Amino acid sequence: MLEALKHLLFIDIETASGHHRFEELSEGLQQEWLRKAQFKWNVPEGDAAALFVDKAAILAEFGKIVCISIGCLRPAGNELKLLMRSFALEDERILLEAFCSKLEAFSHSLNKEHAKSLAFVGHNIKEFDLPYISRRLIIQGLPLPECLKLHGKKPWEVPHLDTMQLWGFGDVKAYTRLALLAEVLGIPSPKDDINGADVSRVYWQDRNLPRIATYCQKDVETTVKVYLRLMGHPEINFRTEILSD
């Protein structure tokens, strides 16, 4: 089983609004936000600006990545160890460069066969995390890593695994939160004092990136447990080790 896990990289990201206030946007972006808010949430123009603080983080054009956490499973004596690393920085470009550098190192650590099939595993990553990372890389003028060059690939040629889609069993309309999935599967999930909707506030008002990174890491840990359960391996246990540079 461990051999089948070696090429998997579990991932989660946290995002915040790209600016603290709507008024900090350029005039062009302000107009585009008003259009987007009216179209996406059907709010009148007068209320769209106030919506920026709460909603901008989910759109790559108006948000930014403030944390990426990744983890891989490796043997540690008679048990498995989840080696996890987080990139949490105010400068998104430096954050993304560091992430891509570690991604390249991870790929090089695999044998040729595994490197070709390097796959991200995460919850709702095909609809959110991976597209968001790719868009922000382009916006920051950075190249896409090979494993994110998905344009033109057929669905079965994309190796990445989405636990939300695995749980959907072909139901493309289904949306199930990671916390709900963990709960119904009986997987202990740490109860934190923040959730995804709080990240912008914690980032801009509290300036507390370590708190965001801890929240992100716990989501990765929960995703690993959910994935193992969905793959029929609930008996596999692991301990988590947080790595730092």
Image (cartoon, grey):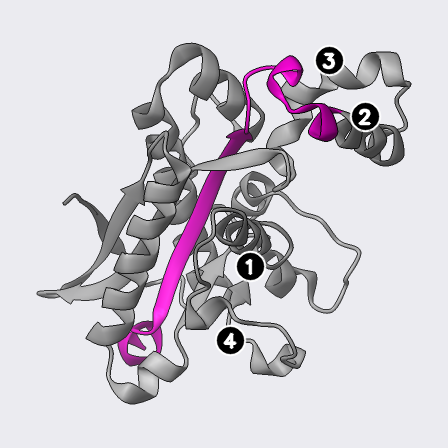
Q: Residue at x 17, y 62 (%)?
A: 79
- Give the answer, above or below, for where 176 lies relative to 101: above
Q: In the image, what residue type sits under mark 4?
A: Pro
Gap between marks 2 and 1, in whole Å? 34 Å
Q: Verify whether residue 191 appears in magenta.
A: no
Q: Verify whether residue 17 appears in magenta.
A: yes
Gap between marks 4 and 1, in whole Å? 13 Å
Q: In the image, what residue type sits under mark 3?
A: Ala
- Report the span colored magenta: 1-30
- How many numbered markers are drawn? 4
Rendered location of residue 169, percent (x, y): 69, 67
Task: Return the residue at label 1.
Answer: 163
Q: In the image, what residue type sits under mark 1?
A: Thr
**Of residues 8 and 32, the one drawn nearer to the viewer in this rendering:** 32
Secondary-structure class at tag 4: loop
Quarter assignment of residue 49: top right
Q: Quick one: label 2 or label 4, which is nearer the N terminus?
A: 2
Pointers 4 and 1 in contact (C-beta within 8 Å): no
Task: Return the residue at label 3.
Answer: 50
Res 34 label: 2
Q: In the image, what residue type sits under mark 2?
A: Leu
Q: Residue at x 35, y 19 (%)?
A: 208
**Of residues 164 and 98, the one drawn nearer to the viewer in this rendering:** 98
